[in-house]
Image (spheres, rainbow, N blue to C red):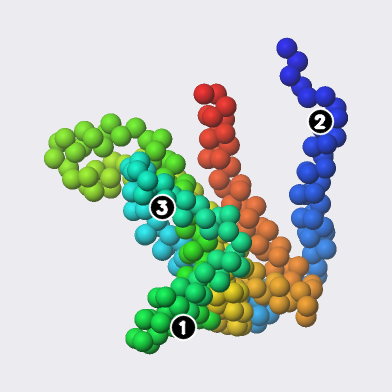
Amino acid sequence: MNRRPPAWVFAMAAVPALLLGVPLCALMWRLPWSNLGAALSSDAATSALVLSLVTSLIATALCVVFGLPLAWALASGTGTTTRVVRALCLLPIVLPPVVGGVALLLAFGRQGIVGQWLADVGVQLPFTTAGVVLAQTFVALPFFVLSVEAALRQLDVEYADVAIVHGASPFRAFVAVTLPSVGPAVLAGAVLAWARALGEFGATVTFAGSLEGRTQTLPLAVYDLLERDPADAVVLSAVLVVVAVSVLVGLRDRWFGVFRSDATT
């Protein structure tokens, strides 16, 4: 049986493929190779790159430390509370990042629900480097939690149950048996969270501003340079594209393997 689509399907498929591919090709085509070193070594670029790496790595660490217990709780729960919490985890993915930044301001700003209490003890988050980390964690956490939760739900719990029967506590069984089994999912989720934190723009600029050397991360520097020095903006944009492509290539076996396994079941 010939299941090959007709020619007009390929013609229509070329339209979205070109829509996705042409802008990226144009970006790489206009990359000023002769000015590449100078653009990357400029003070603004270096400051933004270092700040982005530091804050995104801290945000990723927070995602792992706090996201792993959340993923475990969601994977083991079935009630209404679990569904509500899972929906909250999904919300930052579909929420416009700027709206997320406004929500963070209302929660952790000087007059926010939590921020006013933090201000009383001398802690200020908006327009600080810590605020950048908080904004990045807010948008990146769902990617880690959902990745790990999906792996935990698909895992055979028989071995963990055997460990518990032989005297291990649920926590010890999780650390010694379950966690190594979902290690690839934890790594993939951490990489996804890091890439999302590194590319965060909307929530960061709304909650933390764009102060060079303090809160101006790589995406914010691209936007700022686009008005002052478009060539340098193209170079920094290319850096983010390379990071994104590297993440896709690094996780291709996991993602495509999941798709193939779904197709064969």
Look at label 1 and name its amino acid.
Arg
For disc 3, the marked residue is: 85
For disc 2, the marked residue is: 9
For disc 1, the marked residue is: 110
Q: Does residue 53 show up? A: no
Q: Residue at x 40, y 56 (%)?
A: 67
Q: Residue at x 39, y 38 (%)?
A: 153
Farthest residue, direction top? 1
Mark toward the start of the polypeptide (3 vs 1): 3
Relative height, residue 109 to residue 99 (above, below): below
Q: Residues within 10 Å of mark 2 (few under 14, many from 20)?
A: few
Q: Between marks 3 and 2, how big is the CA–CA gap?
A: 41 Å
Q: For this rendering, which residue is in front, 252 or 98?
A: 98
Q: Residue at x 28, y 48 (%)?
A: 175
Farthest residue, direction front? 80
Of labels 2 and 1, the one closer to you? 1
Q: For this rendering, which residue is in front, 107 or 260?
A: 107
Q: Residues within 10 Å of mark 3 (few under 14, many from 20)?
A: some
Q: Which mark is residue 177?
A: none
Mark toward the start of the polypeptide (3 vs 2): 2
Mark toward the start of the polypeptide (2 vs 1): 2
Q: Is residue 72 left or right of residue 210?
A: left
Q: Position of residue 103 (x, y in %)?
A: 52, 69
Q: Position of residue 81 (x, y in %)?
A: 36, 49
Q: Position of residue 157 (x, y in %)?
A: 30, 34
Q: For this rendering, which residue is in front, 229 or 259?
A: 259
**Badges 3 and 2: C-beta atoms under 8 Å apart?**
no
Q: Residues within 10 Å of mark 1 (few under 14, many from 20)?
A: some
